[in-house]
Image (spheres, coloured by chain):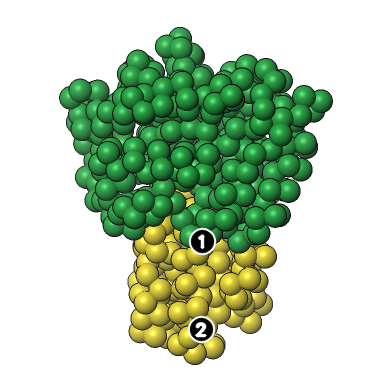
Chain colours: A yellow, B green
Amino acid sequence: MMDLKDLTEAIKTGNRTQATSLTQEALDADLTPQSILDAMVVGMDEIGDKFKRNEVFVPEMLIAARAMNESMAILEPSLVKSGYKPLATAVIGTVQGDLHDIGKNLVSMMWKGSALNVIDLGTNVTPDKFVAAIKEHDAKLVGLSALLTTTMPSMKATVEAIKSEELSDVKILIGGAPVTQSFADQIGADGYSPDAASAVDSAHQLLGIR
Amino acid sequence: MNNYERYMGMVKGEQVDYVPRIPILMHYAAKHIGASYADFAGDYNTLVKANIALAEDFGVSQLDIMSDPWRETADYGAEIEYLETTCPQCLKHPLEDSKDLSLLTRPEVGKTTRLTAAIKAIEAYKAYGYKEYSITGWVEGPAAEASDIRGVSNFMIDLIDDEEFACELMDLCVDVAIEFAKAQIAAGADTIGVGDAIASQMSADMYERLVFPREKRLVDGIHEAGGLVRLHICGNTNHILPVAASLGVDIIDCDWMVDVVKVRELFPKNTVIAGNLDPVEGIMESTPEKIHQNFIDLYHKVGNPYFVNAGCEVPMDTPKENLQALCKPIQYNSSI
C-alpha cells in the first residue's frame, strides 16, 4: 500500500512536482480522498509549526503552499465526489488601504487545508465588502489582514461595520505584522494570530471545532 | 543650531542642542496640507509643499521624498494607479509573467518620469532649505525592488526556485539604485534612505547569502557618491540585524518589534539608531505627555547617537498634539 508520508514530505518541502505526482498516484491507488487530504494537511501543519518557531520564513511557506495548491487542484474533484463538506465558510481579505497580500494568502491556504471553505476578497477591501461577503456566503469566520501601521484603523472600521450589522455569530480574527493581541482586544476582534500557522488553531478555536 | 547642523552633528558624534526627529509622515503629510494622496505621490510640487509644511509646523528635521514604493517600479514599466486617499497600487508588475530582463525599461533620471520628479523635488528642497534641513532621498533596496518588479510572492519563490535569476534581477536593481542615488546626491540630498522591507521576511541565511552582498554594494555606492545611508526595513528584523550590522549604514531605522538595545550592541558605535515607538499604540493612540516621556526614556535606553522616530510611518489620523509631542525637543545628553 502506498505510504502517504512521502506526500506529506513533498508538501512540507515545497516539492510540487513530487506532491502532484504522489497525489495522482494515491488517487489511482484508490486511497480515500480524505486520507490524501489529511496527509497534505500534516505537511502544511509541520511547515507551519516551523514557521511559528522562525525556523523557516515566507519563501519556504510559499513553496509549500504552492505544492499544496497544485495537489489540491488534482484532489478536489474526488473530494467533492466523496461527499466531503468543509467545516465552515470563512471570508478573508486585506483591509482597506492596504495592498499587501502575502500574509493573507498564506492564511487563506492554511485555512483551505484545514477544512474551511475560504472566500478570498483580495486586498484593499472596504468594510462594506466584508459585510456583504459574510452575508452572501453565510460565513462564520472573517480574517482581516494588514501589513501597514497606517491601515490598522481600517481594521477597527471593519470590525465596527461587522458588529453594527449584528452578525453576532461571526467570529473575527485579525493578523499582520503590526497587529497585536492588545490591538485586537481594543477594537473588539474575537482573536489575534501572530502568524499564518497559528491562524489555523485560532480559527478552529473560535469556531469551536477543536 | 539649525536642523541640518543638529542632524549632521548627531551623525558625526558631536554634541548637539537637542535630538533630531525624523518621523515618516507620508499620509499625514498629504492630509496636513489637504492634498489627495494621488497628488502627493504623483506631483512633486505637492510632495515638496507637504514636507516643507511639516518641517515648519512641527519642526521635523528633514525634508524627504518618500511617498510610495513604486517610484522606480513605475519607471521600470509597471502599471500604477494613483489613489485619492492611500498609496498608489501596482496594477501590473513589469515582470509578473516573465523573467526576461530585456522587457524592462531602464529607469533613468531625465528620461523616465518618476525618477526625474524625485530630482526636481530635491532641487526644490535645496532651493528652500539647503543646509538648514537634512534632505533625504530614497531608493528601493535590492530585495524590495525585485519584489516590486516581479510581485512579492513571485520573487520570494524565485529566491528558492531560480536563485540565479533572482540575483541577476537584484543586481540590476542595485545598478539602477546607485545611479539614482548619485543623481539625488548631486541634486542636493545629504542622505539616501534605502527601503528593503521584504528582507525581514526571509531567513538570516538567505538574507546573508543573497541580499546582504547586494545591499552592501548599494551602501558602498552611496557612500562613494558622498551620501549618508539610512536603512529602513519594516517589521521584525531581529533575526537579520546581526548580519545587517556589517553593512556600514549611518542610520538604522528600527521598527517597534526590534530590540534597540541589542541593535546598539550589534551595530558600530557611531551608527545612529532611529526609532522605535509603536506608530499606532505608541503615537496615534497615546497621549502627548506619554509620547514625550517615552521618547526621553527610549533615548536614555538607546544612547547617542539617536534620532527620534516612530517604528514606521505615523498614521494619518494621529492627533496633531501627538505629532507635536513626538517633535517636542529632547535635550541632548552627553553622558549617555
Residue identified by numbered label 2: A163
**Which residue extends farthest top?**
B224
Residue B132 coordinates in the image, percent (x, y):
47, 25
Q: Quadrant of residue B249?
A: top right
Along the viewing direction, whichever of B69 and A114 lies nearer the viewer: B69
Secondary element type, mark 1: helix
Say which mark, if any, is on residue A152.
1
Above or below for A170 versus B259: below
Which chain hosts label 2? Answer: A
Label 1: how many Cα within 10 Å (few below 14, some 14–19, many 20+)? many
In this rendering, the count of numbered labels is 2
Amino acid type of disc 1? Met
Residue situated in front as seen by the camera: A27 or A15 = A15
In this orientation, which residue lies closer to the viewer: B55 or A156?
B55
Q: Please say whether residue B330 is visible from this viewpoint.
A: yes
Which image quarter is the C terminus of chain B in? top right
Residue at (36, 81) in percent of width and height: A132
Residue at mark 2 shares a chain with residue at mark 1? yes
Q: Is residue B225 above or below residue B318?
A: above
Q: Residue at x 65, y 75 (%)?
A: A205
